[in-house]
């Protein structure tokens, strides 16, 4: 795995334009940049181990759901508490930073949520569902920081996202205030998670946090693009459009000039095509419908094809 980490570091330096193509080729003569059979087997072990952790933890949750009326509440607490205790004990006594320890920490984080839900359901605390997700995320935060595992951070990000979604859904005054702010809040929250993934996680010891950054970028751009597209037409969505222009410009410069990431840059590029198409339709709203439809179709086809050709060219330049 050290060879793969070394190759990954070289590719990251190349993406960040700290190495040119000739320097990367020179490094390839000394270090193998392609995974071998043993590396694929190691990856399969990762997938199977973490898949088994998620499935076993989910099986316990579904066991409670199916047998809820048939079990005494003390038996439920004993089973859930024992599961958390066993997973936590495995994490404590496993070798530090080992694959087994990270898998056990992920199981502990998942089972902690099951125990919290069990407490809330048994004693009918009256808490909203968003409070369960928020409390779950807060409670496992030290565990996530200690784990340095992308799986645990993915669970943590998902809980934060679910807590925010349920909070916005439950508080009707936010919906009555303006639906535009809901998309804006979601976009800004995911922007914070994107910054966390790009700037902080690697310093905290997380190996290759790029997949988390990609997921955060997708989760950010969906509500941001939606709000910006409506902002072209609706006055109440104009703050979304302004936020889109500021964030989109800054992120495009960052991912193209400073830290080239073609996946996120492609996401920004095609999002810009969607918003500019809405702006073009707004400018020509009083023209002939047949003319508008054909012009917009030509614009979408032409701009998408041009963007694809440009991205392909950038990819070739990056791989040289």
Image: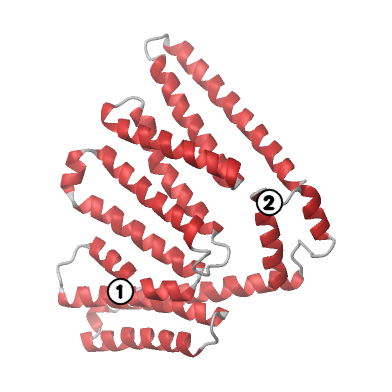
Q: Residue drawn 26% across and 76% down?
A: 118
Q: Nearer the viewer, residue 75 or 92?
A: 92
Secondary structure found at label 2: loop
Determine contact: label 2, label 1, CB under 8 Å: no
Question: Of label 2 and label 1, which has the lower sequence position?
Answer: 2
The residue indicated by pointer 1 is 65
Q: Quadrant location of residue 116?
A: bottom left
Q: Residue drawn 27% across and 85% down?
A: 77
Q: Residue drawn 44% across and 30% down?
A: 275
Tell me if residue 74 comes above or below residue 143 in the rendering. Answer: below
Q: Nearer the viewer, residue 181 or 176?
A: 181
Residue 174 in view here: yes
The residue indicated by pointer 2 is 18
Which of discs 2 and 1 lies nearer the camera? The answer is 2
Image location of residue 18, percent across then percent down: 68, 51
Tell me if residue 293 comes above or below residue 151 in the rendering. Answer: above
Q: Which quadrant of the rendered structure holds the N terminus?
A: bottom right
Left or right: 217, with 233 as reference point: right
Image location of residue 183, percent across then percent down: 32, 42
Q: Residues within 10 Å of mark 1 (few under 14, many from 20)?
A: few
Distance Cα–Cα, label 2 vs label 1? 53 Å
Q: Quadrant location of residue 97?
A: bottom right
Q: Residue drawn 52% across and 52% down?
A: 214
Image location of residue 310, percent across then percent down: 66, 33
Q: Residues within 10 Å of mark 2 (few under 14, many from 20)?
A: few
Q: Nearer the viewer, residue 286 or 289?
A: 286
Q: Which mark is residue 165?
A: none
Secondary structure found at label 1: helix
């Amino acid at each position: 795995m050290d060879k793969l980490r070394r190759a990954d570091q070289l590719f990251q330096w190349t993406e960040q334009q700290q190495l040119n193509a000739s320097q990367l080729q020179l490094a390839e003569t000394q270090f193998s940049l392609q995974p071998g059979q043993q590396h694929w087997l190691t990856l399969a072990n990762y997938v199977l181990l973490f898949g088994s952790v998620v499935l076993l933890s989910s099986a316990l949750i579904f066991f409670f759901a199916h047998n809820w009326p048939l079990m005494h509440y003390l038996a439920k607490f004993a089973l859930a508490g024992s599961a958390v205790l066993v997973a936590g004990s495995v994490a404590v006594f496993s070798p530090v930073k080992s694959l087994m320890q990270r898998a056990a920490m992920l199981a502990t984080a998942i089972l902690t949520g099951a125990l919290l839900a069990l407490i809330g359901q048994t004693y009918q605390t009256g808490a909203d569902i968003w409070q369960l997700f928020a409390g779950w995320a807060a409670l496992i935060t030290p565990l996530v920081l200690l784990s340095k595992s992308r799986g645990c951070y993915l669970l943590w990000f998902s809980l934060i996202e679910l807590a925010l979604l349920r909070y916005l859904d439950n508080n009707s005054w936010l919906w009555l205030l303006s639906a535009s702010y809901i998309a804006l809040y979601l976009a800004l929250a995911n922007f914070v998670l994107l910054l966390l993934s790009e700037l902080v996680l690697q310093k905290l010891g997380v190996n290759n946090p790029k997949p988390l950054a990609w997921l955060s970028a997708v989760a950010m751009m969906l509500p941001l693009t939606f709000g910006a597209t409506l902002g072209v037409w609706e006055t109440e969505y104009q703050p979304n459009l302004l936020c889109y222009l500021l964030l989109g410009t800054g992120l495009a410069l960052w991912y193209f000039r400073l830290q080239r990431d073609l996946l996120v840059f492609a996401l920004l590029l095609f999002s810009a095509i969607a918003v500019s198409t809405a702006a073009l339709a707004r400018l020509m709203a009083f023209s002939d419908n047949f003319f508008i439809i054909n012009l917009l179709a030509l614009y979408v086809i032409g701009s998408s094809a041009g963007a694809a050709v440009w991205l392909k060219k950038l990819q070739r330049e990056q791989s040289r």
